[in-house]
Image (cartoon, grey):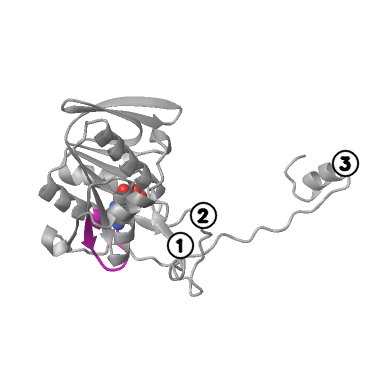
Amino acid sequence: MKVLVAVKRVVDYNVKVRAKADGSDVDLNNVKMAINPFCEIAVEEAIRLREAGVATEVIAVSIGDKSCQEQIRTSLALGADRGIQVETEGAVEPLVVAKLLKGVIEKEQPQLVILGKQSIDGDNNQTGQMLGALTNMPQGTFASELVVDGDKITVTREVDGGLQTLSLNLPAIVTTDLRLNEPRYASLPNIMKAKKKQMDVYSPADLGVEPKAHLTTLKVEPPPERKAGIMVASVEELVDKLKNEAKVIS
Ligand code: AMP
């Protein structure tokens, strides 16, 4: 079984994001970039399926400019077998990503496609669902457990207030939630080995897609600065301030 995993290059989750001075976008100058954490979970799950003898090949695909090859190499160091970069310029919207992934699926014919549930930069939570619609493949989103059984996959989903278990026919699309697994770290020998693994580069035209922008970012602004707190001398003073200044109690 071939597994395709979509990995996105995003700002590292430890970085405090800054807006550009003109408010046109997020400032990515000298900012540490990483694999989107939900995509890391997707890579880990695919590798575990291969280690369990369920998957035969894991392919990591990323869409972006040349710099996203770094995240493909990291996926290869974690254990993916080969990589695919779809070369695009500038930011790509979920619909374009989904169309390009559909093109890769048509070329590679994977039985399982694993994506993160959400990219932490755009917070879109759209690509997996759009890909499901475009390919007509069944989808299990927000997966916290996966079990492949013959030509079916059982997906446990984290929904409000509990868990839902679905059975999907393969080929299928799954998006990962936080509790699916705990990703491993890449070892130094595996980082070295990853340099020799195959990485193909496609253009959108190779996949029959013309990237079109449907959205325009109007403004990016940081959250309002929080005012410093004050110390009160007594419970009476606190109650008085809550009542008469903040007016949150009566
Ligand atoms: P989003 O819909 O942007 O929240 O992203 C959900 C998931 O779609 C991500 O976790 C990735 O698995 C995949 N994805 C989104 N953008 C890209 C991209 N540029 N390259 C590869 N995968 C992507």
Residue 228: x and y, percent?
Answer: 73, 57
Magenta stretch: includes residue 92: yes
For the image shown, how many numbered marks are present on the structure? 3
Query: As shown in the figure, which amino acid type bears the numbered disc 1?
Result: Lys
Residue 236 image label: 3
Above/below status of 206 relative to 155: below
Above/below status of 163 relative to 130: above
| Helix, strand or loop at mark 3 | helix
Q: Mark 2 points at which residue?
A: 14
Quarter of the rendering occupied by the N terminus: top left
Residue 207 image label: none
Q: Is mark 1 within 8 Å of ligand 1?
A: no
Distance, label 1 to label 2, CA atoms, is 9 Å
Distance, label 3 to label 1, CA atoms, is 48 Å
Q: Residues within 10 Å of mark 3 (few under 14, many from 20)?
A: few
Check if mark 1's residue and mark 2's residue have beta carbons within 8 Å: yes
**Which tag, 3 or 1, sits closer to the chain's start?**
1
Q: Nearer the viewer, mark 3 or mark 2?
A: 2
Lateral position of residue 174 relative to residue 235, left or right: left
Question: Residue at the spot x=41%, y=46% of the render?
Answer: 185
**Which tag, 1 or 2, sits closer to the chain's start?**
2
Q: Name the residue under label 1.
A: 32
Query: As shown in the figure, which amino acid type bears the numbered disc 3?
Result: Glu
Question: Residue at the spot x=24%, y=65% of the render?
Answer: 88
Question: Residue at the spot x=31%, y=40% of the render?
Answer: 175
Q: What stretch is highlighted in magenta?
A: 84-97
Lateral position of residue 30 relative to residue 114, left or right: right
Residue 205: x and y, percent?
Answer: 13, 64
Magenta stretch: includes residue 180: no
